[in-house]
Amino acid sequence: MKILVTGAKGFIGKNLVAQLRNIQEGKDKTYTLDPNFEILVCDIDTDDKLLDEYCKEATFIYNLAGINRPENESEFMEGNCDFASQLLNSLKKHKNTCPVMISSSTQAILDNVYGKSKKAGEDVIFQYAKETGAKVLVYRFPNVFGKWCKPNYNSAVATFCHNIAHGLDITVSDRSYQMTLVYIDDVLKELIHALEGKENRDGEFCAVPVTHPISLGEIVDLLYSFKSSRKDLSVAKMNDSFAKKLYSTYLSYLPTEEFSYPLKMNVDNRGSFTEMLRSEDRGQVSVNISKPGIVKGNHWHHTKNEKFLVVSGQGVIRFRKIDEEKIHEYFVSGDKLEVVDIPVGYTHNIENLGENDMVTVMWVNEPFDPDAPDTFYLEV
């Protein structure tokens, strides 16, 4: 099988080629697709003779080439219709009736230059199907978002992600404006399913089954919350599929020199305690560093509970029920990772028994509230 991808350097094309290569190299086995295929890539700089040769050899074609924001309006028709005609004419010349997928837009129903050019491209391929009997797959994509989408071009999400991540201003004319978005990974799944002959049909058109209707204001608020999360250490709700996808997209626009960010370390002669993440519904994660011989803790809780995981060094965690004398000990080490639950009603401490710093990852079921700490000092 030889798969031709036009527009291979564009947003969708680049992502698709990368995923096809994952499948080809056996790195992604979630599809039934036989990995023994060849990828033929074409973009605006590809020689016409080479494209013609590809059209002769191809057994499936993804036509993702198109023009979104040209310098001259005439380029809309050239990129969105004329190129499709060139491609199809080459297929007819070689009597190649392989399946052809074409990326159109929901704007094809609108009375603007871009929409008209997309509609013209649809008409050309539907006519080609009638003439040749070839299988065609026409996708009217709504707004597609995800990594590698060019900002300040034709995607509001890409522009907002880039500007907010870089500390630049954004303009929102109408927060209530409703958008329908599709995530690039959902697009890829659908396109590969189409290659397998399992495309999602919606009448004469094909469609990505997973979409996200959302207002412009909601998108902007989420993006600003992602930016501020580096300071307030909050975590977005990853059980919200759209928030999860948008957060992944936002991170891909971070300046390369700003992948890292500092945390506030609470340091004293015993070591340090540093909060890393916090959420109202999933608790708080912190990193505790104890110097050799140091004992920390000696307190108990009514409702607050914790998990301790020593990842470096060695020590002991001691427990005593507050109304009993018996002490229970758990010896812990970074050489054998195990989580120790800290039940309520037990006063507890942790001591570094080694010669080097002991590092413990600590999770607590609720973020620390200084007004209601639920922490009571009592020696073990």
Image (cartoon, rainbow, N blue to C red):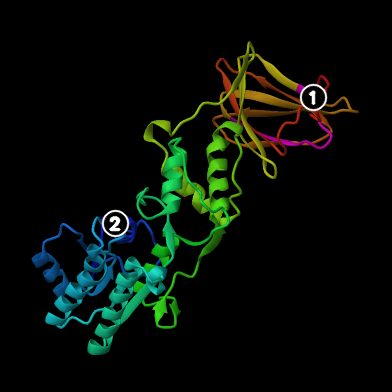
Horizontal relation, residue 206 to residue 82: left or right: right
Residue type at mark 2? Gly
Q: Which mark is residue 69?
A: none
Assess whether residue 228 is covered by the magenta stretch: no
Q: How many marks?
A: 2
Residue type at mark 1? His
Extreme-top residue of the structure: 269
Q: Dot 2 corresponds to which residue?
A: 10
Q: Secondary structure at mark 2?
A: loop
Name the residue at 32% across, 67% down: 113
Q: Quadrant of the N terminus?
A: bottom left
Return the x and y of residue 45 as percentages of the image width and height: 16, 57
Name the residue at 87% across, 24% down: 325
Height in image: 257 above or below 7? above
Q: Which mark is residue 299?
A: 1
Return the x and y of residue 133 as percentages of the image width and height: 26, 88
Return the x and y of residue 18 as percentages of the image width and height: 31, 56
Q: Determine the CA span between mark 1 and mark 2.
A: 58 Å
- Residue 16: quarter of image: bottom left
Q: Using a 10 Å C-alpha cutoff, classify the residue at mark 1 as few (fewer than 14 neighbours), some (14 to 19) or many (20 or more).
A: some
Horizontal relation, residue 352 to residue 35: left or right: right
Q: Using a 10 Å C-alpha cutoff, classify the residue at mark 2 as few (fewer than 14 neighbours), some (14 to 19) or many (20 or more).
A: some
Assess whether residue 303 is covered by the magenta stretch: yes
Please say whether residue 94 is visible from this viewpoint: no
Horizontal relation, residue 9 to residue 256: left or right: left
In primary-sequence order, the first of circles 1 and 2 is: 2
Q: Secondary structure at mark 1?
A: strand
Magenta span of residues:
298-310
